[in-house]
Image (tube, coloured by chain):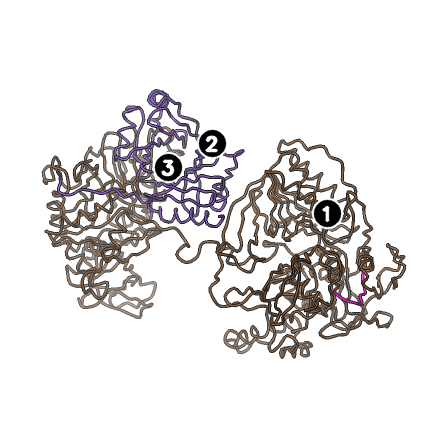
Chain colours: A brown, B purple
Amino acid sequence: MTQPNRIGGGLIDRAKPLTFRFNNKEMAGFEGDTLASALLANGQRLVGRSFKYHRPRGVFTAGSEEPNALVHLRTGAHTEPNTRATMAELFDGLTATSQNHRGSLEHDMMAVTDFLSPFLSAGFYYKTFMWPKAFWEKVYEPAIRASAGLGRLSMQEDPDQYDKGFLHCDLLVIGSGPAGLSAALAAARAGARVILADEDFVAGGRLNSETLELGGMAGHDWAAQALAELASMGHVRIMTRTTVYGAYDHGIYGALERCTDHLADSAGKPRQILWRIYSKRAVLAAGSTERPIAFGNNDRPGVMLAGAVRTYVNRFGVAPGKEVAVFTNNDDGWRTAADLTAKGVHIRAVIDSRDRAAPITLPDVRHIRGASVVNTVGRKGLKSITLTDGQVLPVDCLAVSGGWNPNVHLTCHQRGKPEWRDDIKAFVPGGTMPAGMVVAGAANGAMTLAAALAEGRAQAEAQISDLGFTPAKADPVEAEDEPQDTAAFWYVPESRHRAWLDQQNDVTVKDVKLSHQEGFRAVEHLKRYTTLGMATDQGKTANIPALAIMSEITGRTIPETGTTIFRPPFTPVPMGALAGRARGKDFRPYRLTPSHKWAEEHGASFVTVGNWLRAEWYVQGDEKGWRDSVDREAKTAREKVGICDVTTLGKIDIKGKDAGAFLDKVYANTFSTLKIGKVRYGLMLREDGICYDDGTTARLSENHYVMTTTTANAVLVFRRMEFARQCLWPNMDVHLISTTDGWAQFAVAGPKSRDLLRKVVDKDVDLSNEAFPFMSCAEITVCGGTPARLFRISFSGELAYEIAVPARYGNSMMAVLNEAGAEFGAVPYGTEALSVMRIEKGHAVGNELNGQTTAHNIGLGKMVSQKKECIGNVLSQRPEMIRDDAIRMMGFRPVDRSQKLITGSHFINKGEEAVMENDQGWMTSVAYSPNLGHSIGLGFIKSGHERKGEIVRAVSPVHGTEMEVEIVSAHFIDPEGERLRG
Amino acid sequence: MAEFTLTSAPPLAGVDETFDGIHLRAPKDLAIVAVALPLGGEDAALAAIAKGYGADLPAPGKSTTAQEDGATLLRLAPDQAFILFHRAEPDAETIVAGRIGDTAYLTDQTDTWVALELSGPRARTALERICPLDIHPDAFAVGDAARTVMEHLGTIILRTGQDSFLLLSASSSAGSFLHAVETSIKNVS
């Protein structure tokens, strides 16, 4: 395994050879390589096929801006598509395969699309595949998707783990190049808490790629020394392999740390962490990205950005070619020629679009002034280039430099508008920055080394001074201001062949012209029409040349043309990282009732109610389906006794001298008059008079009430009451605290409930109807001294109690109640039987209190007191809301008792057409009543209270059903309430 | 003797695990009583607390260790505090009432919460994964307390020592809470 293109030097560790596979071919590299540098070292120029035309493509850059060298990394379920080879750190055993070809990479059968390209210009698909309309989804789109595209998913569950986290700092420094290091040093030396983040696995930025000296030493040595100093300080966190991908509100940044992507195995640890960084201030030192020049066939493997060629030579010890030419419109391109010459790589020529003297003297290098490259040859790898004057130069690598663009992306995440600087021919940050952000170095247009160092320090010192730190004294680092002149030269007009702008999306100069011709002239329209700037690289190398060309065509200036908006993320963030731990059963937390364990042991099936898991029914014996269990539970509770865990209902402890008066304000009915030891049903309204929530509130002592809310609204009601207490009536002495989780509460319902409870409560508790009638409450003890609360309330309509004990005893209490009840035939019942019984009794729940209904609608209009000031009572009296012919909650039963009612059915009068104009109301809840032996329902119907006995039709167009139903009282069982008072 | 007896089974009873640089345990028999200061009666209540516990109730967001009952006085809001102390029996409210009388409104919160104590030099590193707050010693000193949300769960975090934190969260979601904390520890150890 030779590495034909490996040369001397670089920051790789030659003592640590690694082997890897690309398209099943074994290759060698070293620790410190990226996959891209190792591929180039092995002479692998062809790396992938392009998105649309399946053009052979190679490594184009040396960083996160890479448009071409995308691979499938790893295998099986671990496969990650669209991994940039320039960002993938080489590890021993790495496996990569190329993307987007049918057949082999070398002989892609889909390459035929390239020859059809005259027909496949921008907008082709939209214009061509329009008819017949139905074909788009079924035929055209699948076919196009199969031929075009990037990588493929494994279609297996992601086996890796991901995590999230939160970090805090005084100063976040984004980027660890010269400006970033300079900023971090300045802030850290002053004592500020600093986070220094860089997407690379080695900090130092361009210092690792250049041969410029600073402080009298090599750039990468200075970087290493600076990092060592920072690392020695406890208040600095250096985060390599960490991309700060988004700037959010109030100095909050999103960052993706790739923890184990450089390892063969994650060893059970999170592969990546999505950090939320809270910074007081931030210095963006994200550097700049080189842009290409567009000319004919400028996408061949071997055509690369000049700065990237330098990176491969200087940092990785790899010569991307043996015969290299440089094509530049600026001084910086010359440094590639200088560095390669110094390393012994032959430079065939430097072609400078500017007709002027060389900025760097290179005696042995041929300088071709005022010329351009018009075309290239070499389908799977560059063989030669043709210049404007017709001469052909045989080269296997062409280093192209069209100037450098400051990485302004994060400055725009809150709609900052970059500004054009003509002296550097590039956009720099402008407009309103995200709060707390400043920019330094090349990202801010300080394109030379000395300027970047000085600006990094100055910006950081200004920021930390603002935060109260005193900058430490230190001499400036010596460095030079290298020549940086750049010409406004974007594409070679003499080129007759396709000149590529966006290599990731196969967008050419011609496509931009076509976009203009068809009227898509604004940059945002250009992007949508041509797809320029989309996909994984977001056009980092393509956008500026494209909009420069658009501005030329339209005759506007570049700043007039403007850029498309930059949005997060700066580079792709895997879905897995966004999900973090929230997968499968860990998607959300679960709340368990105190008797959960007992229920599990006794055949319970569980239903999620919000975050709660509640027993929905308990399977006993050979019960085959849920109805068997539910019918038995509901019947037994009515005939004997049933026990249900009702802990999930919200419980709010209300204390204070004004507790009663406060309740009068939040409830529609009155509570200040409630006697100690009594419970009352309460109804809450919204400010607009619509029903909000209901429940019972018990008065345990003069200044102590205990409220129950519905399960779903427990938190909302608490929050609303806390608002009322703190903001609406701050002068009331009233205090709220949730005790929902503190008390395990059980409904004990049925004619034998009193007998059962007598066995559990302590001897001094008198449960007789006289001593403890319906709607009583008391603080008692059970089972020999355990504190408990007893309420005689009934949701089922039976003689019933709710008994609460401290939650730690809840599981035991459930066992005790069932054991004590065994002699009476007691059964545990779940939420389904609970629901059946409440429908039998006509109690409204969320189905009826749906945020659109009033007390008037549910038949509780008289509860809304007009003798006091309370939330909602005024607006509840608006004429439209108390119309006599308003919908009323009623009971419904099928005329043919064997029929099954359907929730959501709408009521239509007999003989009328089933259309909206004839809508009389709708069915809100239905159940099979085992006690009545047929289906029953609750619902709202116009003037229902005057229509008892009338037959209407319940129509469900969704189900395609229709049946006759009789309007009846909502109280199907014991309408006079004799049982619950007995 | 009653026919039936109840067994106490707090959700996290017995949790006690040691990891590299982190000790995780559920404090045994930690009683919590909420104290609400009556409007207009704050001074009397504060005086009663100072007298009954030998320590002033600290400012909101702060806690202090009292002389009596080994109690921690934790002020959550201007008119709300928690008193935390060791008590196995379900009568914590009575104990506090015995110290401060009826000068404040008391509500037993022992069973409403579960507690986890994280200690050790890597405790803070583990908490970085779920705690949105800045708990660097410069920003969150020993005795400081705050309400926050960890993995969707409302949590009170209290710095009990240079390297130790007490976390309180709802008892009904104890299992999910423990899982969140354990996962954080495992992910960093």
What amino acid is at disc 1?
Answer: Asp
Which residue, given by chain and number where applicable, does mark 1 sit on? A221
Q: Main secondary structure of the magenta part?
A: strand
Residue A193 appears left or right of B59: right
Going 49% across and 39% down the picture, which residue do you hit? Answer: B121
What amino acid is at disc 2?
Answer: Val
Inspect this view and state whether residue A131 appears. Answer: yes
Report the chain holding disc 1.
Answer: A
Report the chain holding disc 3.
Answer: A
Q: Which residues are magenta?
A: A320-328
Circle 2 residues within 10 Å: few <14, some 14–19, many ≥20: many
Report the chain holding disc 2.
Answer: B
Circle 3 residues within 10 Å: few <14, some 14–19, many ≥20: some
Number of numbered callouts drawn: 3
Q: CA distance from mark 2 to mark 1?
A: 41 Å
Give the label, 2 or 1, closer to the camera: 1
